[in-house]
Image (tube, grey):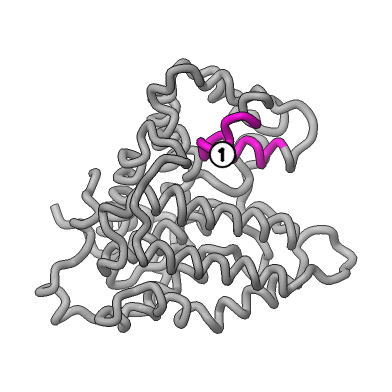
Amino acid sequence: METDLDLLASSPEDEAGSTFIIPKKEISMVPDMGKWKRSQAYADYMGFILTLNEGVKGKKLTCEYPVSETVEKLLELLDTLDRWINETPPVDQPSRFGNKAYRTWFSKLEQEAEALVSTVIPAERAAAAPEIAVYLKESVGNSTRIDYGTGHEAAFAAFLCCLCKVGALRISDQLAIVFKVFNRYLQVMRKLQRTYRMEPAGSQGVWGLDDFQFLPFIWGSSQLLDHPTLEPRHFIEESVVNEYHQDYMFLDCIKFINEMKTGPFAEHSNQLWNISAVPSWSKVNQGLIRMYKAECLEKFPVIQHFKFGSLLSIQPAKP
């Protein structure tokens, strides 16, 4: 299932006949889930996640890697979203959660998304901007419910996957995709969650892995494969988290949980507590990939919101 990121990019001869389309929902009932699991979109999405999982193996966030112009532009895009949060302070309202100022912030993204995406993709692929922009808009939470969850995170991964498919991102960008772009996205999402007191979307409470994210735990556990001293049992120790969180995404996620939650770790983050008993990072990594498929990608409440276009297609995967 693993795919080279460059293989995702369609070749120029495919292009002549290709038309970009505005992605739309295709999974409206539980029986449609089979169509999703057999789709080209599922194969490409999972291939993308696993390619990056392979790419970050044993690497620190602080290691050396090339940063392309596209990556720089993506970071500027995320800086813009961050700046808009500063320009849109929360409003006074009776309910503590779901601050309505989020809707003001979101409407700015809705208006600007296509223009923002146009700055990132090659000029000859400008026609793809409206299609790709849909995934960016879907990746920051829901403006009606003022919530955020793993489906929104998946939309951001889909956004990055589409950028690979139009050749804006390359195989040489894989470390920068996770360590620079996805990491910056996480920071902006955490700021959104905190500033507007967003609710977790479809949260399983203490039985879920985390209220908001999943992918950084997968890629973060891959970073820790074969680490000489850090074992899964160490991540529940605050001193370890504080010392290593700048190098490892997994530990940075734990740090955020520790800042946001009170009480014993075993109570507020039961699944992660259980994971700390797993003997090796490779078992953690494999288990999380299985869990991600089962708990996110194969759950109708998550996938009913996923949108399909020409780049992430509902058509059956090519054998």
**Residue 227 place in picture, x, y as percent:** 43, 22
User: Toward which corner of the image does residue 262 lie, by quadrant?
Assistant: top right
Say which residue appears at 36% left-offset and 66% top-offset.
69
Q: Which residue is mark 1?
A: 246
Amino acid type, label 1: Gln
Q: Residue furthest front?
A: 64
Q: Residue furthest left?
A: 13
| Quarter of the rendering occupied by the N terminus | top left
Say which residue appears at 28% left-offset and 48% top-offset.
47
205 in relation to 100, above or below: above
Q: Decide whether residue 251 is among the magenta residues.
A: yes
**Residue 246 place in picture, x, y as percent:** 56, 39
User: Toward which corner of the image does residue 14 lie, by quadrant?
Assistant: bottom left
Q: Decide whether residue 81 is among the magenta residues.
A: no
161 in relation to 116, above or below: above
Q: Find the magenta span and give its range.
A: 242-258
Say which residue appears at 45% left-offset and 73% top-offset.
134
In this orientation, which residue lies closer to the viewer: 233 or 229? 229
In this orientation, which residue lies closer to the viewer: 80 or 278? 80
267 to the left or right of 231: right
Q: Which secondary structure lies at badge 1?
A: loop
**Residue 77 place in picture, x, y as percent:** 50, 70
200 in relation to 253, above or below: below
Say which residue appears at 15% left-offset and 81% top-offset.
17
| Secondary structure predominantly adopted by residues drawn in magenta | helix
